[in-house]
Amino acid sequence: MKKKLMDILACPIDKHYPLELHVFAEKEEIIDGMIICTKCLRWFPIREEIPEMLPDELRDRKDEISFLKKWKEKVPKNILTNGKPFNLKIKKPK
């Protein structure tokens, strides 16, 4: 993904702009990273140069949790614990 794409992206859920970019791996373009909406705390992965800005119901929980675990050291702490639609916060059983 080219960084200049961030100039036109808005959150698909609440239309917030601008979004926050976190780059995890980069060559000529961003290979892996994360786009974050600071308003609703939704995060969207960038995998193999492609930003995946899908609505919650079309996202695969297993894939998203795997992505968070893979990049845990680079993902902002507030996304790890409070990010939507998925995060790594351990929920206590009722």
Image: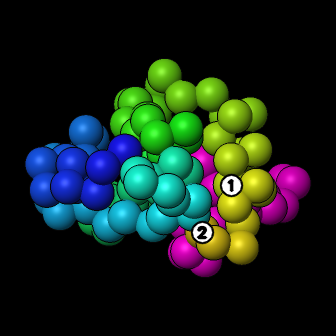
Question: Which colour assignment does the render follow?
Answer: rainbow
Q: Quadrant of the N terminus?
A: top left
Q: Amino acid at mark 2?
A: Val
Q: Are marks 1 and 2 in contact (CB under 8 Å)?
A: yes
The residues colored magenta run 76-94
SS assignment for the magenta stretch, majority: loop
Residue 59 vs 34, above or below: the answer is: above
Residue 53 position, x and y percent, is: 37, 36
The numbered disc on residue 68 is: 1
Residue at 62% x, 28% y: name it.
Answer: 60
The tag earlier along the polypeptide, 1 or 2, is: 1
| Local SS, label 2 | loop
Q: Is residue 52 left or right of residue 88?
A: left
Q: Residue furthest top?
A: 58
Q: Where's residue 78, x and y in %?
A: 55, 75
Residue 84 can be seen, yes or no: no
Say which mark, if any, is on residue 75.
2
Outermost residue toward the bottom in this view? 77
Q: Residue 17 occupies which quadrant of the picture? A: bottom left
- In percent of width and height, residue 82 lies at 56, 65
Residue 67 in percent (x, y) is at: 68, 47
Q: Quadrant of residue 87?
A: bottom right
As drawn, the label of residue 83 is: none
